[in-house]
Amino acid sequence: MASLIDALDVRKRTLFELDNVPYLCLDSEVSTPTARGGQTLVRLKIRNLLTSAVFERTFKAGEKFREPDLQVVPASYLYSDGNGSHFLDQESFETLTLPENVMGNALDYLTEGLIVDLRKFNGNPIGIELPPVVELPVQSTEPGVKGDSSGGATKPATLVTGLQIRVPLFIKEGELVRVSTETGEFGGRA
């Protein structure tokens, strides 16, 4: 049987199950009453891992949650088509498909063969976790203007995935650049 998690123990990045749905805690705040006999409440900002919906909810301190039946397996990105995005489970070597609505903006960072953490709930794929930084080639960018290098000037660049970012003037087409998957910003040459 899965262990139980007390509402007071739920912290940022804690995974728990509520009404047979897995959630990730994004933020928690405990409010203790000032009056006698008042109830301690836990306010959680949580993300539904099936729908990616984010909302806040308040629980009583004594409430308990089940630990979700989540697995994280390494998987390599294969391709995307009308049926969704396809990944190869690196442990079982089966092809797993995630629908387009689950992928969100992750396709901006995926290139063929990239290893990601694929999350499964009760054995079914429900989402992926990208690495913090990915390396992507620059598909197109304008040449830097000579003499316009004061103050860290930048220019727009389109990467092979279609993602548009701002890069320093010295970056040329075909160069490999590091991009943060959290902020979508340039992180240096690869």
Image (cartoon, rainbow, N blue to C red):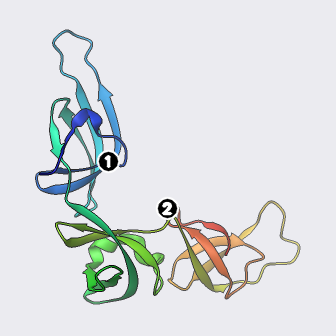
Q: What percent of the width, then of the height, locates residue 68?
A: 20, 55
Image marks 2 and 1: residues in contact by CB distance under 8 Å: no
Q: What percent of the width, then of the height, locates residue 84?
A: 28, 84
Check residue 32 in the rendering and tell me which mark sits there, or answer none: none
Which mark sits nearer the N-terminus, 2 or 1? 1
Kind of element beneath mark 1: loop
Give the number of callouts. 2
In the picture, measured across the screen, residue 169 lies left or right of residue 141, that is right
Residue in the picture at 44% in, 69% down: 130
In the picture, measured across the screen, residue 128 lies left or right of residue 113, that is left
In the picture, measured across the screen, residue 71 lies left or right of residue 173, that is left
Check residue 182 in the rendering and tell me which mark sits there, or answer none: 2
- Examine the rendered structure and indicate whether residue 110 appears above or below residue 49: below
Q: What percent of the width, then of the height, locates residue 31?
A: 29, 25
Query: Which amino acid type is shown beneath numbered disc 2?
Result: Glu
Residue in the picture at 28% in, 86% down: 95
Binning the other alpha carbons within 10 Å of mark 1 as few (below 14), some (14 to 19) or many (20 upward) gives some
Q: Quadrant of residue 179?
A: bottom right
Q: Which residue is mark 1?
A: 14
Query: Which amino acid type is shown beneath numbered disc 1?
Result: Thr
Name the one closer to the observer, 130 or 90.
90
Kind of element beneath mark 2: loop
In the picture, measured across the screen, residue 50 lies left or right of residue 168, that is left
Q: CA distance from mark 2 to mark 1?
A: 19 Å
- Examine the rendered structure and indicate whether residue 171 appears above or below residue 21: below
Q: Quadrant of residue 138?
A: bottom right
